[in-house]
Amino acid sequence: MKLHITQLLEGLNQIAPFGLAENWDNVGLLIGHPEREVHSLLLGLDPTLSLLNEAITRGIGTIITHHPCIFRPFPSVNLSTPDGIFLEQALGHKINVIACHTNFDNAKAGVSDALTKLLKLEDVRPLRPTIGSDDKTTGSGRIGEYKHLLSFTEFMQRCFQTLAIDTLQVAGARPGKIQRVALCGGSGSDLAADAFAQKADIYISSEIKHSTAVWAQDVGFCLINGTHYATEKPAMLLLEQQLIDKKQQYGWDVDVYQSTSEEAPFVNIYP
């Protein structure tokens, strides 16, 4: 069955309803034609020039990213800037670009759920449920349990394995035993207080503010700063599988690829 952008968007809306996006966000088809036929998809966390070049080189006509390539209105399009170059080349090569950002963050099986699965948490629920919704499975962040207590060392080993990272920043009092875990893939400093209020033993997120870390020290709560890239990258593998499931469900004639060029923008340097 041939797949067109409109059908792809319908499938994505089933995976991560666009109505779940925050009102400040920009999601959906950001570059392209809604009736264009889709033969292949390239998934990446960020709409970078390297990701676009990968799509061009591999002959892939549609890109799906987590972070939107057009986030705020452009006062002008300067073709000497990365944003301008991205727009010009995407349009020139007729590459469609779709963003699933906070709608995927807040979805029932979204960004934070990818982490809960890898950390093997159970009884998972949203840390901050969607306001005004009867669906209690959607919302920001997640909180879950372990049936058996883990030591701090055991839990940290799971974090390193899940995030595929070799260093982590920790603030606050380190718990001796861990059972209840709260987390938020991506930037989640503002959810730390929610995690503490719901009696989590530890909270994992990224871009945790200095003031939040100081607060954690004062109240005796443990925070793990896992980096934005590492806490969100597993979600792209989840999205890949969800799209493959849709392909099989509807008989879409489309190939789904994960980016092979994307890597974390920060690297660790040791003395």
Image (cartoon, rainbow, N blue to C red):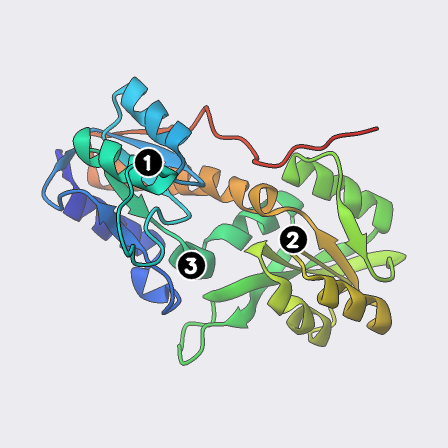
Kindly identify the residue that appears in the image at 45 percent across and 40 percent down: 236
Residue 102: give its label. 3
List x then y, in percent, for residue 89.
25, 31
How far is disc 3 from disc 2 in space, using C-alphas? 22 Å
Tell me the residue at 78%/45% (across/down).
Answer: 156
In the rendered image, which residue does mark 2 sit on?
Answer: 121
Residue 148 position, x and y percent, is 79, 54
Q: Say if mark 3 contacts mark 2, CB within 8 Å.
A: no
* Residue named by callout 1: 80
Q: Is residue 258 visible?
A: no
In the rendered image, residue 116, in percent from the top left (x then y), is placed at: 60, 51
Q: In terms of depth relative to the viewer, which is nearer, 59 or 183?
A: 59
Q: Residue furthest top?
A: 57
Q: Residues within 10 Å of mark 2 (few under 14, many from 20)?
A: many
Real-space CA distance between mark 2 and mark 1, rounded to the nearest whole angstrom = 46 Å
Q: Where is residue 45 shown, x and y percent of the image? A: 45, 41
Q: How many marks?
A: 3
Q: Is residue 71 left or right of residue 179?
A: left
Q: Nearer the viewer, mark 2 or mark 1?
A: 1
Image: 33 above or below 16: above
Distance from disc 1 to disc 3, alpha carbons, whole Å, reads: 29 Å
Disc on the earlier residue, 1 or 3: 1
Q: What residue is rendered at 26% in x and 46% in y?
A: 77
Q: Residues within 10 Å of mark 3 (few under 14, many from 20)?
A: many
Dot 2 falls on a residue whose secondary structure is loop
Q: Residue at x 41, y 48 (%)?
A: 67
Return the disc, 3 or 2, that comes first in the chain's sequence.
Answer: 3
Disc 3 marks which amino acid? Answer: Thr
Earlier residue among tags 2 and 1 = 1
